[in-house]
Image: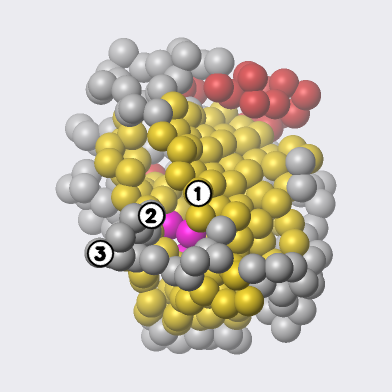
């Protein structure tokens, strides 16, 4: 078990992570918001009226609305090429505006993994700062490794990922509900909790942003934000919900 998990105890769950006080270096709290998309009306991006999504990232990959497997309606279908000279991406981007230290950001979505896609080496959700003036858009990423959900923090300068080796493995050809709640913060003022089908599979306390002069997250990317597999991959996403509130 990861040492961060041991330090707070899984039984304490979300309360221990989110009860941490807001840093004195916080800027103004983000106004609370809640946005959703089930893709039944198609994939609306950019200048599309009422669009939730600012842009599509399609680098050796594509995103589109498509019939949802095994259920009524449509879902976001993401397909990315095998890893080659560059990293393949197939995702959509929500621009929230700056969410400073202390903000509690929750992103929830349904995920369906076709049997032909490896349950490994795919990034699903990136929380980044695109306007902090730092190359590479620092942030944290939810990804799959050997069928389990992990959080990578290498882009904020922390090598070790948050992991839980005894967490359930995702099953292909079925829908899973994934919820990731993050307190934006430095050192122990930050933290994250992930649930899979209502069960906690990851909980950790620590930095979730890089210690820059401007400290915030301002965008959420969902889809195949990177594919590191030597084969093409495809995923379906549905019932996406993104919400934020100031920390208490």
Q: Main secondary structure of the magenta part?
A: strand
Going from N to C along the chain, the mark reached first, 2 or 3, is: 3
Q: Label for residue 36?
A: 1
Which region shows up in magenta? 221-225
Q: Vertical placement of 112 versus 99: above or below?
A: below
Q: Label for residue 47?
A: 3
Disc 1 on helix, strand or loop? strand
Q: Are marks 3 and 1 in contact (CB under 8 Å)?
A: no
Whole-Å distance between the Cαs marked 2 and 3? 10 Å
In percent of width and height, residue 160 lies at 55, 46
Q: Vertical placement of 34 versus 66: above or below?
A: above
Residue picked out by circle 2: 52
The answer to which image quadrant residue 162 occupies is top right
Q: How is the image coloured?
A: secondary structure
Q: Which quadrant of the figure contains the N terminus?
A: top right
Say whether residue 99 is magenta: no
Whole-Å distance between the Cαs marked 1 and 2? 8 Å
Q: Are marks 1 and 2 in contact (CB under 8 Å)?
A: yes
The answer to which image quadrant residue 26 occupies is top left
């Amino acid at each position: 078990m990861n040492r961060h998990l041991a330090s707070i105890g899984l039984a304490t769950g979300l309360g221990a992570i989110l009860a941490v006080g807001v840093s004195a270096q916080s800027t103004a709290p983000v106004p609370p918001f809640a946005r959703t998309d089930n893709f039944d009306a198609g994939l609306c991006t950019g200048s599309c009226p009422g669009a939730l999504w600012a842009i599509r990232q399609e680098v050796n990959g594509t995103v589109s609305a498509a019939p949802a497997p095994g259920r009524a309606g449509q879902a976001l279908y993401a397909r990315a090429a095998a890893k080659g000279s560059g990293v393949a991406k197939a995702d959509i981007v929500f621009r929230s505006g700056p969410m400073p230290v202390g903000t509690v950001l929750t992103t929830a979505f349904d995920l369906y993994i076709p049997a032909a896609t490896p349950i490994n080496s795919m990034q699903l959700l990136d929380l980044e700062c695109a306007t902090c003036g730092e190359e590479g858009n620092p942030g944290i990423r939810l990804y799959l490794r050997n069928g389990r959900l992990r959080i990578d923090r290498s882009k904020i300068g922390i090598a070790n990922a948050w992991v839980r080796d005894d967490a359930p493995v995702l099953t292909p050809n079925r829908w899973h509900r994934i919820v990731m709640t993050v307190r934006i913060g430095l050192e122990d003022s930050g933290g994250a909790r992930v649930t899979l089908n209502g069960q906690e599979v990851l909980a950790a306390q620590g930095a979730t942003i890089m210690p820059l002069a401007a400290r915030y997250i301002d965008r959420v990317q969902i889809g195949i934000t990177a594919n590191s597999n030597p084969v093409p991959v495809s995923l379906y996403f549905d019932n996406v919900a993104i919400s934020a509130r100031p920390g208490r």
